């Protein structure tokens, strides 16, 4: 298990942030299990997962805000495991903004610097720079209670910014905002990262935020990093059933089946006489088609299903055509979600909303086998 | 791991060091506990000492020959002025006063809170404001005219008198408690009950009161301790035959002639405090909830 | 139609007794007391108006002067000390200390006891021949002197000790609830900013707790103004009448000295002073509540 949770790539002193064998346990409850991770300088890493997966715990441990059970934390080449949060060279932004309520915007950003004993001119210069970057200049005299949610979070980002640190930590910073503001601020954070190029670690449960912001995403569950990859790989080649099901909306369809042989090539029998050939399927490096009879799960994203009829396109072996009946329709505006069945199992298909389909109509559709995923049912791992 | 981390570099939890701040903190907490506990300790050990030992002083010293005689005397033969019957009649009086007062005042508070929250009637907010304002004023403002009213009605110095007075002066906090709770109940629940054909009393008794069980518990804790601990209303309104335990206790202790039997006095004091203390220790966090609810205005 | 009427009658009938009760028992009695203060009533109320003569007499009565001086000293010191002790205890309990529940129980238990019990306990403990002073002498500290309860100039302060003992737990409980309701992320942010704990309390937490502190102050001062039982039990107003409070004064003139007119005048003065302090606060709280409702 610990080997699974190790994503260390080199010497911890060389990374911007490095975590080694981090264990957080309360009695027998293990929140983080021997986790190792290297984050190179300038990377935007998103920790993604459902609540209770340990992502916030990991972030708080890096910040030094909670006692760890075992392991080491390295930041900017220094072992900071026993350092106070303020000495770790980090800035942090919180979900509830955590602004000091009775202080002005200016004082919120300046307070830490004042305590640290910086000269007044230096403080003014740093706060001024951050305010300019975040368009907070007209608001500097206001109290947090006089600001909108988006403005408050910009102040919180500003407070992290003035610390002139290498690493920024974000703990679900956009969760308290409405959808509109969330997408606006998301763009601002992305732009900020492009401009200043600091290492950023960002915790969220929102996959859109993860996909749009991240250089790499660490999908977590049960205190273990399930997959650490760039967004494209996470989306297209999920490492296991959990990642496959967690990423994507509407969720990937899972079809239970058994490995069989079809014309001498491996195929999946999903029941009801439907046998999907796996000739074009790219197995994971080092793994090949499992023995016939193995229980597997075929994962197909709703948006990777092509509708129409075989005659519309060429049969190139890349697609597997079959038929279904529309059981239910869910128009969402841009797309329409069709519910159908294949081999007696539910299947969702996303089609363009212009595509006219009638309830209970029979239609032809094809799986795009290049983009399908195959998992071992017993282990849940990608094959 | 690698050679670099294998050196004696920091790993695992930061070693806890006993800082001076931490020592000071525990010192302060220990001193405070001593301050709060010492009086109870002195009372208990003194109440277990025979009079010869009490006369020696040494209030913190454990009794050489512990005895429960002072407790028996306090209960049944300590003197209040001329009568030497102990504190037991006060105990029964306090029970007779507390039980009906608690029930009536909680029912009244719940009913008024229910009226205020769900049946918007003209002037009821004014009435509530007046009630709250009244709660902030010292009782002395109301006491004398009330005495005259009860005397005029021929009910002065009776059980009825003391019970209704507790109800009147318990009303502000009780009403506040229930009004605050009921205003957090979704109005849809009330509407649904009305659509189902339930009337004023039916909704109150079958829907809202059962829903408010936690508040009722808090109210019971608040009222039992409050009414049991009352001294002022007891002296003025209860009448000599109905004097509650607190009044009797004060009489035993502060009107004694000749040598004072401190051991008996302390036993009587502990007996008087026993009921609210039991409520306190049994109810635990509910008590804290109670004072928070009763304390915080809204 | 008839049915509807009947249904609307129930709430009216239910609320009617409250109108009678509150108008008579609160408003009526208060007005009656004020009215009496302008009369020459002795044992029984009588409508023989004497203008402001009772007030004149009140302000030249030594006992009233003592009582009103006492209540200021008593209230202000009691509030300041209880607030400080209660707040420090709440902060101490908020430091993740061992046996927090037990310690909280110990600090709060005096609050469950009556003022009479509290007063009697401290009467004994502060009695020089019996309590603390005697214990210190027995331990060999011969010069230790603590005779407040028998010293006319200090007796009122001995009541403060009892008041602090009983009331600090309440302040602690209110303050602790206030401290616990502060967003934990504020503490985290302050840690990242490197602000020392004591500075967080002074610059961030205390300003945030203003409503809680106001509540505690109001509660304590209401209790202080009402102080009667504890005085009766601890000093009985003595030695002499040196530790009288207005509450004692009023009860004394109503029921012992049978001078209703003067007692009523004292009541009215207390009413005016209390109103000046609490009515603005009361309306602020009340209207803020209304605003929040919309």
Image (spheres, coloured by chain):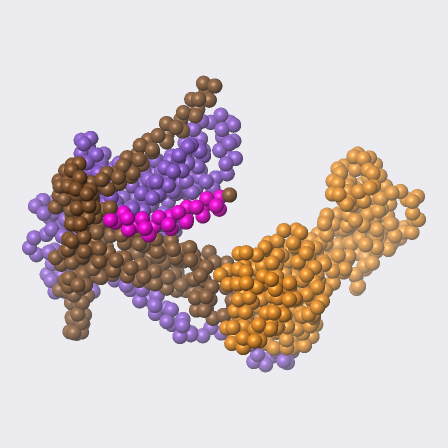
Chain colours: A orange, B purple, C brown
Q: What residue do we see at 17% from left, 39% from top?
A: C49
Q: Is residue C150 magenta?
A: no
Which portion, as a residue range, is magenta? C269-293
Taking C210 as reference, is B11 above or below it? below
Q: Nearer the viewer, residue B94 or A335?
A: A335
| Residue C180 image offset from top left, x and y in percent | 45, 57
Q: Looking at the rendering, which quadrant does residue C220 occupy? A: bottom left
Magenta region, main secondary structure: helix
Using the rendered image of the protein, determine whether residue C228 is visible from the camera's viewpoint.
yes
In the image, what residue occupies the spot 40% across and 38% down?
B125
Looking at the image, residue B195 lies above or below residue C109: above
Q: Is residue A323 above or below residue A198?
A: above
Q: Considering only vertical position in the picture, is A211 above or below C10? A: below
Tell me which residue sits at (50%, 73%) in the image. Answer: A115
Is residue C273 inside the magenta stretch?
A: yes
Towards the viewer: C62 or B253: C62
């Amino acid at each position: 298990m610990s080997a699974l949770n190790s994503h260390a790539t080199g010497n911890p002193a060389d990374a911007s942030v490095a975590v080694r064998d981090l264990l957080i346990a309360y009695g027998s409850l293990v929140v983080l299990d021997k986790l190792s991770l290297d984050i190179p300088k300038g990377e935007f890493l998103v920790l993604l997962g459902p609540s209770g997966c340990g992502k916030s715990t990991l972030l708080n441990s890096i910040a030094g805000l909670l006692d760890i059970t075992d392991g080491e934390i390295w930041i900017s080449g220094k072992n900071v495991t026993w350092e106070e949060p303020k000495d770790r060279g980090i800035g942090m932004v919180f979900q509830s903004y955590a602004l000091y309520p009775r202080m002005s915007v200016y004082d919120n950003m300046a307070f830490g610097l004042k305590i640290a004993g910086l000269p007044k001119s230096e403080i003014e210069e740093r706060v001024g720079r951050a305010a300019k970057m975040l368009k907070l200049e007209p608001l500097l005299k206001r109290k947090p209670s006089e600001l909108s949610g988006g403005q408050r979070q910009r102040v919180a980002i500003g407070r992290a910014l003035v610390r002139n640190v290498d690493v920024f930590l974000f703990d679900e910073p956009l969760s308290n905002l409405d959808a509109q503001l969330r997408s606006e601020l998301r763009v601002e954070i992305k732009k900020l990262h492009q401009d200043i190029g600091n290492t950023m670690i960002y915790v969220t449960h929102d996959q859109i935020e993860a996909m749009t912001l991240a250089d790499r995403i660490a999908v977590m569950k049960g205190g273990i990093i399930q997959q650490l990859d760039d967004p494209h790989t996470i989306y297209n080649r999920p490492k296991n059933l959990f990642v496959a099901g967690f990423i994507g909306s509407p969720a990937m369809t899972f079809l239970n089946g058994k490995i069989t042989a079809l014309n001498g090539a491996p195929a999946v029998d999903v029941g009801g006489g439907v046998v999907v050939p796996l000739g074009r399927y790219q197995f994971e490096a080092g793994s090949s088609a499992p023995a016939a009879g193995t229980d597997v799960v075929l994962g197909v994203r709703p948006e990777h299903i092509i509708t129409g009829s075989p005659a519309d396109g060429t049969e190139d072996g890349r697609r597997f055509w079959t038929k279904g009946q529309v059981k239910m329709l869910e128009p969402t505006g841009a797309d329409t979600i069709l519910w159908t069945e294949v081999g007696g199992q539910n299947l969702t298909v996303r089609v363009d909303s212009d595509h006219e389909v009638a309830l209970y109509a029979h239609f032809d559709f094809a799986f795009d086998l290049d983009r399908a995923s195959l998992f071992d049912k017993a282990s849940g791992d990608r094959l | 791991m690698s050679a670099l981390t294998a050196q004696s570099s920091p790993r695992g939890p930061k070693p806890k060091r006993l800082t001076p701040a931490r020592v000071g903190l525990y010192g302060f907490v220990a001193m405070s506990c001593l301050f709060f506990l010492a009086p109870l300790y002195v009372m208990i050990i003194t109440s277990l000492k025979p009079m010869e030992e009490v006369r020696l002083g040494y209030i913190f010293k454990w009794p050489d020959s512990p005895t429960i005689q002072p407790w028996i005397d306090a209960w049944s033969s300590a003197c209040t002025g001329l009568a030497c019957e102990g504190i037991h009649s006060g105990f029964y009086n306090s029970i007779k006063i507390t039980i009906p007062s608690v029930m009536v005042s909680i029912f009244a508070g719940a009913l008024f809170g229910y009226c205020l929250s769900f049946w918007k009637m003209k002037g009821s907010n004014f009435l509530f404001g007046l009630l709250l304002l009244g709660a902030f004023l010292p009782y002395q403002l109301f006491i004398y005219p009330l005495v005259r009213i009860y005397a005029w009605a021929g009910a002065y110095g009776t059980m009825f008198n003391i019970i209704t007075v507790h109800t009147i002066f318990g009303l502000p906090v009780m009403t506040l408690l229930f009004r605050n709770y009921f205003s957090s109940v979704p109005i849809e629940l009330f509407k649904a009950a009305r659509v189902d054909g339930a009337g004023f009393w039916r909704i109150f008794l079958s829907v809202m009161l059962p829903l408010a069980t936690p508040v009722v518990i808090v109210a019971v804790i608040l009222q039992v301790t409050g009414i049991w601990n009352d001294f002022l209303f007891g002296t003025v309104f209860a009448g000599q035959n109905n004097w509650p335990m607190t009044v009797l206790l004060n009489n035993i202790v502060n009107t004694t002639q000749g040598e004072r039997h401190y051991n008996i006095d302390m036993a009587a004091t502990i007996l008087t405090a026993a009921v609210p203390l039991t409520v306190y220790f049994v109810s635990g966090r509910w008590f804290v909830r109670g004072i928070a609810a009763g304390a915080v205005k809204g | 139609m008839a049915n509807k009427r009947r249904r609307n009658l129930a709430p009216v009938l239910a609320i009617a007794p409250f109108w009678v009760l509150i108008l008579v028992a609160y408003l009526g009695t208060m007005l009656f007391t004020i009215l009496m203060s302008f009369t020459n009533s002795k044992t029984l109320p009588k409508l023989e108006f004497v203008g402001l003569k009772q007030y004149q007499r009140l302000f030249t009565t030594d006992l009233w002067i003592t009582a009103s001086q006492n209540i200021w000293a008593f209230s202000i010191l009691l509030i300041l000390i209880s607030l400080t002790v209660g707040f420090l205890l709440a902060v101490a309990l908020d430091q993740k200390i061992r046996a927090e529940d037990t310690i909280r129980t110990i600090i709060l238990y005096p609050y469950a006891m009556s003022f009479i019990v509290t007063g009697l306990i401290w009467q004994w403990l502060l009695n020089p021949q019996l309590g603390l002073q005697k214990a210190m002498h027995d331990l060999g500290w011969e010069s230790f002197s603590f005779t407040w309860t028998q010293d006319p100039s200090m007796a009122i302060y001995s009541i403060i000790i009892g008041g602090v003992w009983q009331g600090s737990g309440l302040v602690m409980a209110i303050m602790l609830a206030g401290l616990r309701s502060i967003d934990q992320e504020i503490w985290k942010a302050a840690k990242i900013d490197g602000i020392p704990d004591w500075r967080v309390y002074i610059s961030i937490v205390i300003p945030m707790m203003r409503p809680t502190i106001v509540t505690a102050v109001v509660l304590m001062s209401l209790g202080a103004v009402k102080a009667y039982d504890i005085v009766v039990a601890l000093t009985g107003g003595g030695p002499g009448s040196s530790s009288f409070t207005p509450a004692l004064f009023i009860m004394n003139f109503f029921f012992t000295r049978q001078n209703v007119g003067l007692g009523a005048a004292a009541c009215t003065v207390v009413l005016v002073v209390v109103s000046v302090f609490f009515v603005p606060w009361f309306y602020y709280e009340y209207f803020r509540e209304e605003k929040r409702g919309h």
